[in-house]
Image (cartoon, rainbow, N blue to C red):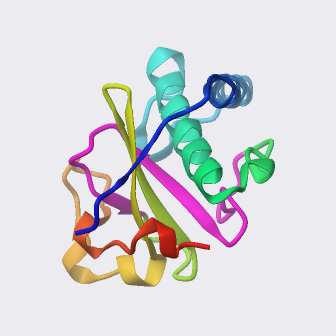
Amino acid sequence: MQTPIHFSFTEEERQQAKEEAARRQSVNEARGLRGRNKGASVGDKALLIHALGTAGEMAVASYLGLKQYLYQETEAKRGSADLPGNIDVKTRSRHSYDLIVQKNESPDKRFVLVTIENGITLIHGWCYGRDAMQPSFWADPARGRPAYFVPKEHLRPVDTLS
């Protein structure tokens, strides 16, 4: 298993990610949208989920030199990617957590695992959807939200993602 990349946000990056999280939450609440995968849809918990996601996207975009493409979508669209190159960032709240890929995702999409815990951001690696969609990775630890859970040792190094 490769060593994850420790990412440090600039103050501007941190602020931009916070603003985008608040914007997403505001849009979702105004439209009465439900949280994905039975997640919170209103309040502080929902905002925290958005903040985690926007921070992970910022970390990967900054690392890859793609910040100019960040936050292009004004509304969530199924099947869209977070960054050019069909890159989707999946951010988790614990460094011990695996990459999650949903059953209906594109096999050609590239998924990047970022974890943020106790103020430390790590970019772990990536894989294609087709690599994630192995029967051995299928699990339902939260009961009622099955998905593919890809252990970090099966991810490619981030520096191979271009």
Q: Measured from the top left, where is residue 135 in percent x and y?
A: 24, 81
Q: Quadrant of residue 30?
A: top right
Residue 159 placed where, x, y %? 49, 69
Residue lying at 69% horizontally and 62% vertically, measured from the top left: 80
Nearest the eye: 152 or 50: 152
Magenta-tinted stretch: 76-101
Magenta-colored stretch includes residue 69: no
Eyeballing the image, is 154 above or below 81?
below
Q: Nearer the viewer, residue 123 or 144?
A: 123
Q: Quadrant of the image for the N terminus?
A: bottom left
Is 100 magenta? The answer is yes
Q: Which residue is outermost to the top?
A: 44
Q: Main secondary structure of the magenta part?
A: loop
Answer above or below: position of 78 versus 44: below
Residue 41 location, x and y as percent? 52, 28
- Percent of width and height locating residue 61: 64, 52
Q: Is residue 118 left or right of residue 107?
A: left
Q: Residue at x 56, y 76 (%)?
A: 106
Can you tell which quarter of the image residue 59 is in?
A: top right
Image quarter where the C terminus lies is bottom right
Q: Left of 99 or right of it: where is 53?
A: right
Q: Residue at x 27, y 64 (%)?
A: 152
